[in-house]
Image (cartoon, rainbow, N blue to C red):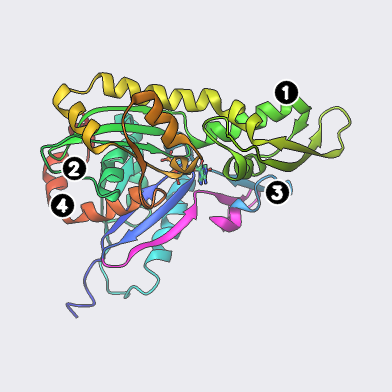
Amino acid sequence: MALLNFSQDLGIDLGTANTLVFIKGKGVVVREPSVVAINKATGDIEAVGSDAKKMIGRTPGNIAVIRPMKDGVIADYDTTAAMMKYYIKLAQKNRSSFAKKPNVMVCVPSGITMVEERAVIDATKQAGAKDAFPIAEPFAAAIGAGLPVWEPTGSMIVDIGGGTTEVAVISLGGIVTSKSIRTAGDDMDDAIIQYVKRKYNLMIGERSAESIKMDIGSAKVPTEVDEMDIRGRDLLTGLPKTITITSEEIAYALKDTVDAIVESVKNTLELTPPELSADVMDRGIVLSGGGALLKGLDEVISDETKMPTFVAEEPLDSVAIGTGKSLEYIEQFRSQSKNSTHRFTD
Ligand SMILES: Nc1ncnc2c1ncn2[C@@H]1O[C@H](COP(=O)(O)OP(=O)(O)OP(=O)(O)O)[C@@H](O)[C@H]1O
């Protein structure tokens, strides 16, 4: 019975774009979009994750597709709790009915307010956690990217997600300087939508904008120009129309967002004590999160800061892996943080 009665603790990357669940000993077992489709009449959940994401922009009037997280924090509490419950169940599908509720390490942006953080803790408990421990996202990302966060040396991480970009310099198990801006991948998609609308009078959806970004998007004007056909609704005639767009145009559309990200990295470096800056100079800046996959972003950051810059090995999984690895320090989190990341980030 003792074996059946064990609890399998979880690490959760509750992201604006994607939610990932990590189980100790197994690694990342759930990797799904943070999207839920709800029947407006009954309130029932129709689909969660990739099935719900496919419905974006394609639903009949009675179904609403919701992205319950915005800018890294909970925008729709009940839907977030329901989504987490679904993913926790999915992660534990072979769990014994005698197993105890899991403790959950869940990431939150470093710029989160106390109220926003409390909502994440409560939603995680409502979703089935025995106890929930918030961990600052850049700290988790740095652990997941394999940086030596516990050592007396400066490690710099830039985590670019869907809703937030988190920049932090970490040493001796704590965040020394950090900056969290609510500008990231979603803003890139929006910039592409606005550019196509302004230049071509063409309305495209957020899923199309995201695939343009992933296929031909880049942080700087590319030396070899790519082209892509995109379809949308002509705002003048109201009819469907196809246009061809170039990677040069997309780099131009993304410029303001990329500049904001670069600026946040520079601001953090300016506030970093000199010894730690010297460490970062030696070891380089590490980029994580899906936004790190934007072509040329590492080069632009390196050019602008004059620091070597690398993309983490599995940028989309770094935060989840970090929350999972932190489960080993759960007692430390329990006594030190008393459920607040603010002690780690202040
Ligand atoms: N190849 C790619 N090129 C550019 N952007 C990409 C690529 N792959 C994924 N992305 C973007 O990465 C973002 C999602 O990253 P990630 O899953 O790390 O975010 P998140 O953790 O859900 O968000 P947040 O940390 O802000 O809450 C999306 O905006 C997605 O479009």
Tag 1 and tag 2, C-beta contact below 8 Å: no
Residue 273 pos. (x, y %):
17, 22
Relative side of 256 to 331, left or right: right
Which residue is labeled 3 in the image?
A: 62
Whichever of labels 3 and 4 marks the residue nearer the N terminus, that label is 3
What's under tag 3, amino acid-wise?
Answer: Asn
Give whichever of discs 1 and 2 has the lower sequence position.
2
Q: Gap between marks 4 and 2, in whole Å?
A: 13 Å
Residue 282, position as x, y percentages in the image: 22, 35
**Circle 4 is placed at which residue position?**
329
Mark 4–mark 1 CB contact (< 8 Å)? no
Mark 2, residues whose alpha carbon is within 10 Å: few (<14), some, or many (≥20)?
many
> Disc 4 or 2, which lies upstream in sequence?
2
- The local crowd at label 1, few if under 14, some if 14 to 19, many if 20 or more residues have their Cα within 10 Å, is few
Magenta region includes residue 152: no
Nearest to the observer: residue 31 or residue 261: 261
Badge nearest the viewer, 3 or 4: 4
